[in-house]
Amino acid sequence: MIYIAILISSIYILSIITFIIGFDMVKIVKNKNYSPKKSFSIVIPFRNEAINLPVLLDSLSSLNYPTYLFEILFINDDSTDNFKIIIENFQKQNPLINSHIINNCRKTKSPKKDAILTAVEHSKFDWIVTTDADCEAPINWLNIFNQFIEDYEPLLISAPVKFKPQNSILHHFQNLNFLSLIGSTIGGFGLKQPFMCNGANLCYDKKTFIEINGFSGNENIASGDDIFLLQKINEIYPNKVTFLKSEQSIITTKSENNWKLFINQQIRWASKSTAYKGKFAKFIGITVYLENLIMVCLGLLTLLNLFYWKIFIFFLILKIIVDYILISKTSNFLKIKKTNIYYLIISLFYPFHTTIIGCSSLFKKYEWKDRRFNK
């Protein structure tokens, strides 16, 4: 047991250290105010998001980009609320912005993938930009995408997402978890081993999407429109997927407002990990899960037998330190610091959370947008 714990913990700690190095290898991008050239179709799949739409629409109406170079496609996935009135009022108030409400054309077991495919079929412009209805876009969002495309000629751009600040233990728990994911995402891109991205802030070339046949091959997995597309493009064009590390590109979203929704979200995210094709993604996923499982086992064994306490404390401290360095770098970039105050206490409970979620994702169904999905 001890030798297994030492091996797994050593691999985990070395992995996080490499992510820290990779994080710094991704350079900050400053806005150079390039002349707008690229055209974008902003795709927003939604289901019963009337309460969130006004904030998103307000941010989209403020975009600092020529209206003739972008369109907004609202893909309605069987909503039953008053979304139509809200979007139609937005259209009346912003007649120069080309926007359309389109009903989702369901073909697979994945509503969101179907929504994006529906949008691509209706889109008029060269670049697809996806976000969510509970998000808020920065004013220079499209400007910085335009600049990045001009400078680096990528085919897929992953960009940062952060939570709106709240003051609750649930929020801080989610925030620290999310910061670790964002930090690992950026680190992976820096190491030339991209394995994660977030569909709330993703931009990709429409021709490439059509060329690789979109989400073909993983339609039966309800979520994963972002990560599976990243892996697919990276497999064919390994030097053409990039991360846009810029304050001008940060999308802001909401954390879940109760534990049930949060747990469902975590199970949904974890459930798609078994379908990852990339060896690096699988390696990291297994390593993270085993490290947290080992921490739980060692902690419980220490309560039964003090023989284990030195090895447990040693690797727990190392884990807390390296995790904090990556989280701290990420929070500094995203300008989020208050959550760090809660890091130590939350980090002690986090291994239990990861272990339970990992086990649940293998067997438990989850709810998403008032629908139930199998693994």
Image (cartoon, helix red, strand yellow):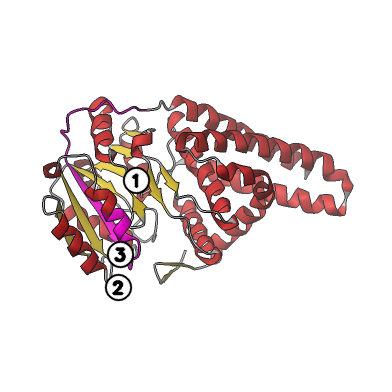
Q: Amino acid at mark 2?
A: Asp
Crowd tier of the residue under label 3, counting other residues whose Cα lies within 10 Å: few below 14, some 14–19, many 20 or above: some
In the rendered image, the quadrant that contains the N terminus is top right
Residue at screen point 54% across, 46% down: 285
Secondary structure, mark 3, is loop
Find residue 292 and report its horizontal and vertical position in percent: 65, 48
Residue 236 visible in image: yes
- Label 3 vs 1, first from the N-terminus: 3
Q: Out of 330 and 9, give the one closest to the viewer.
A: 330
Determine the residue located farthest toward the bottom in the rendered image.
80
Determine the residue located farthest toward the right in the rendered image.
306
**Which stretch did the figure color magenta?**
29-57
Find residue 34 and report its horizontal and vertical position in percent: 21, 27
Find residue 225 and report its horizontal and vertical position in percent: 35, 52
Residue at screen point 62% across, 31% down: 14
Q: Out of 254 and 74, give the one closest to the viewer.
A: 254
Q: Amino acid at mark 1?
A: Asn
Q: CA distance from mark 2 to mark 1?
A: 25 Å
Q: Nearer the viewer, mark 3 or mark 2?
A: 2
Q: CA distance from mark 3 to mark 1?
A: 23 Å
Residue 243 visible in image: no
Residue beneath label 1, please?
A: 201
Q: Is residue 50 magenta?
A: yes
Q: Is residue 2 left or right of residue 30?
A: right
